[in-house]
């Protein structure tokens, strides 16, 4: 039996690295990188917040893309308090509205205003 050559080892290493890289890319983004508090601080806190600018129609394209990512982060978390189904529905609706705003859809503003109802979400899910 012939022993593996350098070429065989080289291609085996390349194949292994490529498959590991593909697996890593496929799972990229499936785990939250920001806490719910960080998302709230970055995107939703204050009258001049990113969410407020989106609601007023004064946001930039970069603002809208950042909000898509922030709302995606929320969907990756479990409910801090309350019903998981409610949390999932509210965060999914908020994320869908952010994507709609970023894409420039006609009804996006109304969709955003309905989904970005702070009190509804905080009443059900914000711990004391």
Image (cartoon, rainbow, N blue to C red):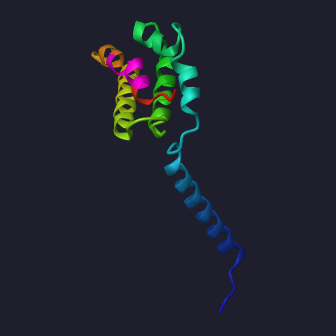
At x 34%, y 29%, the residue is: 93
Is 121 included in the stretch rendered in magenta? yes
Q: Position of residue 124 (x, y in %)?
A: 40, 28
- At horizontal 58% and vertical 38% (from top left) the residue drawn is 33
Furthest-bottom residue in this view: 1
Of 87 and 60, nearer the camera is: 87
Work out whether residue 11 can be spotted: yes
Which of 32 and 126 lies nearest the eye of the viewer?
126
Residue shown at the point (58%, 34%) measured from the top left = 34
Quadrant housing the N terminus: bottom right
- Can residue 116 be seen? no
In this figure, what is the number of numbered marks? 0
Residue 29 placement (x, y as % from top left): 52, 42
Is 127 located above or below residue 30 in the figure?
A: above
Where is 73 relative to 116, above or below? below
Q: Is residue 99 magenta?
A: no
Most common secondary structure along the magenta stretch: helix
Q: Quadrant of residue 101?
A: top left
Task: Provide the residue span drawn in magenta.
Answer: 114-123
Furthest toward the left, the residue is: 107
Residue that sits furthest to the front in the current view:
128
Q: Nearer the viewer, residue 115 or 20?
A: 115
Q: In this rendering, would 113 be left or right of 11?
A: left
Q: Position of residue 54 (x, y in %)?
A: 44, 13
Please say if 63 is above or below 36: above
Q: Position of residue 127 (x, y in %)?
A: 50, 29
* Residue shown at the point (47%, 33%) measured from the top left: 74
* Quadrant housing residue 122: top left
Front-lying residue, 127 or 52: 127
Q: Is residue 35 left or right of residue 126?
A: right
């Amino acid at each position: 039996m012939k022993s593996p050559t350098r070429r065989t080892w080289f291609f085996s290493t390349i194949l292994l690295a490529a498959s590991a890289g593909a697996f890593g890319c496929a799972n990229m983004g499936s785990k939250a990188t920001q806490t719910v508090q960080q998302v709230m601080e970055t995107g939703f806190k204050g009258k001049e917040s990113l969410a407020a600018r989106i609601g007023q129609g004064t946001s930039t394209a970069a603002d809208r893309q950042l909000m898509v990512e922030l709302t995606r982060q929320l969907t990756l978390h479990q409910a801090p308090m309350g019903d998981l189904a409610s949390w999932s529905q509210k965060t999914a609706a908020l994320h869908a509205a952010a994507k709609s705003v970023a894409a420039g859809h006609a009804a996006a503003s109304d969709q955003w205003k309905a989904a970005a109802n702070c009190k509804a979400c905080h009443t059900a899910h914000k711990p004391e």
